[in-house]
Amino acid sequence: WPKPSGRRPSLPIASSPLPLCPAIRFLGAASPSARPAMGGAESTLADDTGAAAGGSDGRRGRLFVGVDIGGTTISVGLVDNDGVLRGSPRDVTAVGGGGVSPVWWEPLGEDHSPAQVARRVRRLVEAALAEDGSSMTDVCGVGVCTPGLMDIASGVVRSAANLKGWQQVPICDLLAEALDVSRDRVVLENDTNASLLAEVWVGAARGRKHVVLLTLGTGIGGAIMCDGRLLRGSRGQAGELGHTILVPDGRPFGGAGVDGIFEGYASASAVALRAAEEQRSSGSSGADGGGSAPADCAATFGAAQRGDERAM
């Protein structure tokens, strides 16, 4: 066997601000440039000219809608063929968090009904198109990404632990109907796979053929590219590390049905949950014990950076 060279490979590290995460996801889900890496399963977004979309010119004809249905938010954005976000909200109060965002988004809330989610996606798409001065006739493809187990070819989410009641959901059919577009122009992708494909297309991993990506949010996702090909595995679950048992019989978390999983310790929601437990046990009311708002992941990291031992 060859001896190790002692040199560590140079790894691309993404340092995008948190609000860009959903944007990066649907860049990958919607991009025709990423389809060769996907293995051809999403081969019907648009032809090479974009003329089938009915756009008024070549640039408009290469406009894509990206949709990210996550465990806590619904996000929508417009992406052109160069991977540039368009139609971003100028009024920060128009989106769910009231802060600067490159995409249109709102909290998922408690109603996870697939039909209702599709209708909410339509409203966000209409807002983005209006901001850009475009219409659905300018769109030549729609990419949607979700967490969970899915059948990419049929556009069905088989199961999503973070989306209540999502079992065998034909999300591509629902979005095609809600947006009034042809079904063959809507494609589904796992959210973390979409993140990886976007980083390879226009992000930190551009030009790389071997890439591993982890997403830390409501849960934990993983994606792997080897020799320029996205690895899916026999059941489409390659790279999915979130439900790996990290501590046998450890902390219960979410609806996984198994205790001690990776998500229960390292996801953003788990960090917030553990910070809240610390608040209750110590009698404090904020991430830094100073009587501020209840802890979330960002506040907990901020407290750790300030040297709070409980946060660390």
Image: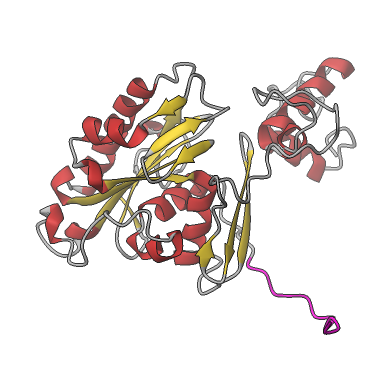
Please provide the residue range marked out in magenta. 1-12
Q: Name the residue located 18 percent from the left edge and 48 percent from the top edge.
A: 134
Let me know if residue 11 is in the magenta part: yes
**On the image, which quarter does residue 301 sit in?**
top right
Let me know if residue 30 is in the magenta part: no
Camera sees residue 87: no
* Helix, strand or loop for the magenta stretch, by majority: loop
**Direction from residue 187 to residue 228 in the image, left or right:** right
Q: Name the residue located 53 percent from the left edge and 57 percent from the top edge.
A: 196
Tell me the quadrant of the picture where the N terminus can be found. Answer: bottom right
Question: Relative to the observer, which residue lies in front, 294 or 221?
Answer: 221
Q: Name the residue located 37 percent from the left edge and 25 percent from the top edge.
A: 117
Residue 303 image offset from top left, x and y in percent: 78, 37
**Most extreme residue toward the front, as rendered?**
234
Question: Relative to the observer, which residue lies in front, 57 or 88?
Answer: 57
Question: Is 13 placed above or below 157 here?
Answer: below
Q: Name the residue located 41 percent from the left edge and 54 percent from the top edge.
A: 27
Tell me the quadrant of the picture where the C terminus can be found. Answer: top right
Residue 148 image offset from top left, x and y in percent: 54, 36
Question: Relative to the observer, which residue lies in front, 18 or 32?
Answer: 32
**On the image, which quarter does residue 69 sit in?**
top left
Residue 104 image offset from top left, x and y in percent: 38, 39
Residue 289 image offset from top left, x and y in percent: 82, 25
Camera sees residue 220: yes
**Direction from residue 237 to residue 3 in the image, left or right:** right
